[in-house]
Image: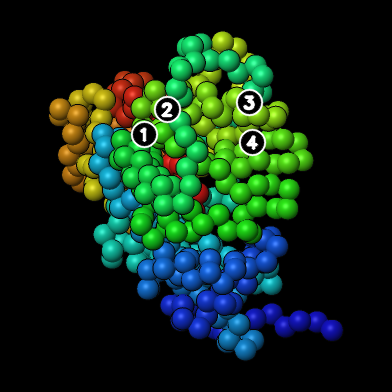
Amino acid sequence: MSTPTPDPDSLILERALPTDWPDIFAIDARAFALPKPLPADEMLEFRGRVGEDATVVIRDTGSDDQIVAFSLYFDIPITVPGGAVTPTAGLSWVSVAATHRRRGMLRRMLTQQYADWQAGGFPLATLTASEGTIYERFGFGPATFAHRVRITPSDAALRTPAPTDSRVRYGAGEQIARHIPEVHARWAAARNGALTRPDSWWPSILADRSFRRNSQTTDVFYLLHDDGYAAYRVDARDKTAIVDDMIAVTDQAHTDLWRVLTSLDLITAVSADLPVDDPLPLKLVDARAIDVQSRPDTLWVSILDVADALSRRTYATDGALVFEVSDDFGDRAGRYRLTVSGGRGEVATTDEAADVRIDIATLSSLYLGGIPVRQMHAAGRFDADDDAVEEFAAMFAVPQAPFSGTFF
């Protein structure tokens, strides 16, 4: 028996209704290969994180109004070079049913979301990508990265001698709830590329729901420091400490927390995601104690308003460049003159000859400084003469690699 192909006219895009959420959670679990949908208490918390009109669905009206695709976004700020905390639309939970692929539904949803983001005045959009080949055509580019490492504690001696008091304590209950959001906010405000976690996110993060672990992993343990914290759990099968979250506002907090994490009793390995410029290897007597197993992208960025976005960050050197930006998805194409004075940029549209010809996804990848401009040019990703490449690279250089620190 053959299954009829859905009539395109029967696929209707609209805002999600309150009654749609049980289906949305079920579809998400199926699309992302989760063992089951979120528990009821986590569903309620999740709903509180999503704006009222931030979710779109596509219904197949020829099949009992079944939801066959949906997407949503969060209002989640990011710190850009220079320290400005900038609103972003954080695209997430993008799902299209396997039964309805290649019918243009992803493009339809993102076209609507893009219009919503522009109407909402967002200068940037962000996402964490489950696959690396989907979102560039919509103007997103990978912009922050991490080193996924495995550390051998027995070899991870720090160069500085241990203090008589580590300044680190295990936290519990209200102490955790008070300390961690405050420290994270301090860190995010000062870290290039960091995502600020809205207040509505913390109950779910700190609750350590059972679905986040399996039968062989422990609850989360919290190490607290005046200027940082670390959250980890232990996999009992191989005695690996899995660091879920590690935040240090100061170098001293970084050293103190890692001294404890690398000296946990009976632990044979520590796994963590580190910023690509994290100083931990250089703090060890033997840097080979850290095995970098991969370098995943951790955040994709899409510039929604070129003039607004470029004027929000600071620049390493003064100068001027004209960018000719192409955009095959939205309306961001144009010629923009970026003039930097005292590290601050002013941007205006212009008819001047272009110094740099670049697509919006590539410019978005370079925005936070996580990919060197010269490396991107060597890959053939934009056109410019040697002088323009050098000026572009000098202007967009950053003192600190971007690190997002939050998955969504």
Distance of mark 4 from mark 2, alpha carbons?
A: 20 Å
Q: Is residue 52 above or below residue 250?
A: below
Q: Amino acid at mark 1?
A: Asp
Q: Which residue is mark 3?
A: 151
- Identify which residue, 128 or 123, lies in the foreground: 128
User: Which x, y percent locates residue 23?
Assistant: 59, 77
Q: Is residue 7 left or right of residue 92?
A: right
Looking at the rendered structure, the secondary structure element under dot 1 is loop
Q: Which residue is mark 4?
A: 241
Q: Is residue 99 left or right of residue 366?
A: right
Tell me whether the residue at label 1 lies in contact with that at label 2, contact meaning CB atoms closer than 8 angstroms.
yes
Among the 4 quarters of the image, the one containing residue 270: top right
Distance of mark 1 from mark 2, alpha carbons?
A: 8 Å
State the residue at coordinates (23%, 23%): 317
Q: Amino acid at mark 2?
A: Arg
Precedes in sequence: disc 4 or disc 2: 2
